[in-house]
Image: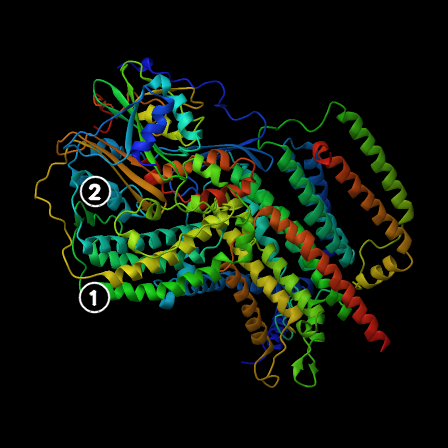
Amino acid sequence: MGEIGPLLSQLFHTGRDWAAGHGVPPLGAQILMMAVQVGIIILSISLVPMVLVYAERKVAGFMQGRLGPMEVGPFGILQTLADGIKLIFKEDVIPRGADRWVHIVAPIVACAPAFVCFAPVPFGKGMTLVDLDTSVLFIFAVSGISVIGILMGGWGSGNKFSMLGGLRGAAQAVSYEIPRVLSVVPLLMFYGTQSLRGIAVAQQARWLGVLPKWFIFYPVIGQISFVIFLICSVAETNRTPFDIAEAESELVAGFHTEFGGIKFALFFLAEYAYVFLASAMAVALFFGGGDGVILPGGLIPSWIWFLGKTFMIVFMFLWFRWTFPRMRVDQLMSFCWKFLLPWSFVNIALTGAWILWRAHS
Amino acid sequence: MINLPSIIFYTFSVLAIGMAIVVVTSRNVFHSAMALTGTLGVVAGFFALLGADFLAASQVLIYVGGIMIIMLFVVMLSQQPFDALQRQTNTQWLYGILFAAAVAASLIRSFRDVYRGVAAVATDTVPTSAPIGRLLLGDMLVPFEAVSLVLLAALVGAVVFGQDRKAAK
Amino acid sequence: MSETSVPTSAPETFPQKPPEKGMFISLGPQHPSTHGVLRVAITADGEVVTSAQPDVGYLHRATEKLAEKRTYPQIIVLTDRLDYLAAMTNNWSYCLAVEKMLAVAIPERADLLRIIVGELQRIASHCVFLGTYGIDIGAFTPFLIAFGRERERILDLFEEICGARLTYNYIRIGGVMADSPDGWEARVRTFVKEMYGRVDEYDTLLTYNPIFMDRTKNIGTMTAEMAVAWGITGPNLRATGFKADVRKDDPYSLYSQFKFDIPVGKQGDCWERYWVRVQEMRESLKIIEQALDALKPGETMGKLPKVYRVPVGEGYGHLEAPRGDLGFYIISDGTPSPYRMHIRAPSFINLQVLQTLLKGWKVADVIAILGSIDIVLGEVDR
Amino acid sequence: MNSAELLAAIKAKFPDLQEIPKVTGQARGDELYLAVPSAKLVEVCRYLRFDPPLSFDFLSFVTSVDFKTHFEAVYYLVSTLHKHKLVLKVKVEDRNKPQLPTVTSIWPTADWQEREIFDLMGIGFEGHYNLRRILLPDDWEGYPLRKDYAPKPDRYD
């Protein structure tokens, strides 16, 4: 296995040329290839939640002294597939008191942005679908749309508990969005670019030829940034210890109480897609993207490095979930506004000082 | 001239106008708010179409992901679900339409004069965030900070008005 | 008997309807955190609870009436179904009452076996509390560790000694059902040794977790005076700093011979109610060890005729069940079945304090407070 | 205080209260049993609760018994300070309209226990602030713990 980025690029060029050679206008061929690329990304991102759900259940099982799914397929690896099939074929129930239209659209609004967000993620050398100049901002902006899906789910169910869950989830997501964006600002200042790929590539260097020049290894600023980013990402994805939006002991299941079948699956898909997205972003921002360590370059292709590191971060998400209790709403908010936000400002100031010092020396 | 950008532009325009009409005609406040969200999202699409990537992203981040969510919040908190499907418009809708039409006409007139001969669609997408940053923290620093001061004043005012009288004592 | 002969209307002072101001929330009877079929009618002004009325009775099975139609030994089976998480102590409490009336002597081995299973039962019951309270607060893993690992071990031990895992019917009037099987004592000893480490594990996982402490510290505080006035017993009372334990105050069985401490809290908040229970697990382990040391071969059933009559009169036997002071008040008219049996159910009496305890706390704390009272609806509704 | 001292202390204040003596051959605990007329119940309870040498601050349980000719309410009191116990027995003669004064103002714990008695035995408690059925449905007919209660066949019978 080598780098598949150039290979894919080659493939798309060949495909476009082939289509153009068979009488398809250039514009059409371009759109066709775009569609193929988008299709590939949607398919692979849809597969990710399946893997993550399986991983979650296995990790939870091992942490709780049990085995997790074992029945469907060897070691239960087909369990998620079976669950998916079950969910698709379930009856679609819309409660009588629900706002029909909002109820139906809500899962789509929650889920669709998750896929769009993967467009500028640099999965490896030459594996960035759209290398946007403002990709960091783009991801933050688009992932914010999902919050509306949560609110719609809360409103559209016509259920008090759902509405409370939706309100809580949205309030939490909007609040944590702010320190999350601010935690990335030091990186933007440091590398002078907003492109995820650009930031990842800029980190592919070594200190003294050994320690990778990843942002996480920059003393103080790197660690503060990463910790704030990680905490906020957990909160953004509504997972324990920040899962007050779906707190099952208080709100039954929060905003998705009334959703079943494929609509529930879409909410679920969105959650895991965002977990993966946040991990991928953390890798690109703080862990040098596809940059390898220890082994000489090229032995293991960059995309394997990237996915490996991403799954390490994903594991941290799972680990948090199965270890921590849930915070209370007001504690959650004060933690965000009185702790994370001031520290992210401090970190920006520190980074500014660092950059000034670097410029002067 | 039928090319890809113009097709997208007209699709977006139809969407934006259609949803804007839903905003003022829908009886369900929540539906109105949703339609407004859509309108603002399409505006971001226009920005993207013009090559203003930073503006497009900011539009989505601030309007769709921020302001609209706060508005939905207000709608959800202030209304009992589904018992208030009353009309959004009052009896003066006719004057409203006339006034809107007058504003639209004057805008179209002035824009036609100003932008005559200017291409509607930027052909090359140059990254805009760096120039915008330089502008905001360079030539435009004073207005930029003045605007933030206004926002701060609004924030303080909101806190003062929103404060519980009893709690203040 | 006419229906109108008894006043049915409540005085005007109590608000039957929720107050006009504020939001009405009906928590339950189907809700994940009510631990069964309990309904709490809450009125909240904003986030603050202004009134709370627990609504019970969804699981009422008329145990007291049923008892009037059964013979004394048959009633033990009914007691299993009260607090189904601590059936051993239910059996035991009932047997204490009947044995008082019969004035029968219990062999020492039977008493020690009772103490061992009773304290194991206390640990098992607190394990369930710990797990479910973790879930209430949002931590799922403690449940599967405490409930699925340690409690399972205890249930295995119970299964060996009496053949049942939930409704034991092991403690009988005059002694216990059967002697322990071969090697059972050694297995209990190994379990106890391991369990010390497991309780430490709970401390690292949940007890001293900062988020958990944030959620439960200084929440739902109760003073000792309030607790005594409301008749609260068990860990809930001890969490207020009030040192009260039937095992010490009114020693039954052989408890006066054992050395153990009564853990007490300081201010009776949710965390201390939890912490007292964790400490109690440790004390129970100490008692079990001492009881195992004292265990000598011997009879396990007192000298009772095959068919016996309970003399006319009355008896009250009570003991320290995992949830508090569990008592059975029995009136006998000399017939094979009791004339009247009353159960002093600690869950029922502890639950009523919610009416005042919840007032003034945030809606988000309701679950934390409700969970920390640790009720079993089988006992509340009887 | 032991039973004799307790009795003396209570007799000093309420001379006409009678101890219920233990009948030989019958089973009973070592506690002091007192018969209290229902008219004096609240007064006696208040004294028992707030008199420092007595201070029966803990009402362990309240229950009732149907003796076919009359009802009897049983109050089991414990002093957490002095560790002495006392059983009060109150006769309710009127089977048609059984009434007792409530002791919720002295021990709040009587709240639900009195409601339970009202629910299952049908004894009313004057002054109780929330006397409703607690365990049975609100529209239940009759009082099941009475000896003459005949269950009505429902749709499951």
Among the two numbered marks 1 and 2 on one chain, the one whose residue lies closer to the N terminus: 2
Rendered view: A30 above or below D110? below
Residue A213 image offset from top left, x and y in percent: 69, 77
| Residue at the (65%, 50%) spot, across then down | A334
The local crowd at label 2, few if under 14, some if 14 to 19, many if 20 or more residues have their Cα within 10 Å, is: many
Where the C terminus of chain A falls, by quadrant? Answer: bottom right
Give the residue displayed 26% in from the left and 52% down from the top.
C254
Q: Chain of mark 1?
A: C
* Amino acid type assigned to the residue bearing label 1 in the image: Gly
Tell me residue B152's x, y (percent): 81, 46
The coloring applied to the image is rainbow
What is the x, y in percent for residue D127?
Answer: 43, 19
Which residue occupies the foreground of this view, A11 or C101? C101
Residue drawn where x is 43% and y is 43% of the image: C237
Q: Are marks 1 and 2 in contact (CB under 8 Å)?
A: no
Residue that numbered label 1 is attached to: C183
Q: Identify the residue under disc 2.
A: C76
Q: Can residue B93 be seen here?
A: yes
How many numbered markers are drawn?
2
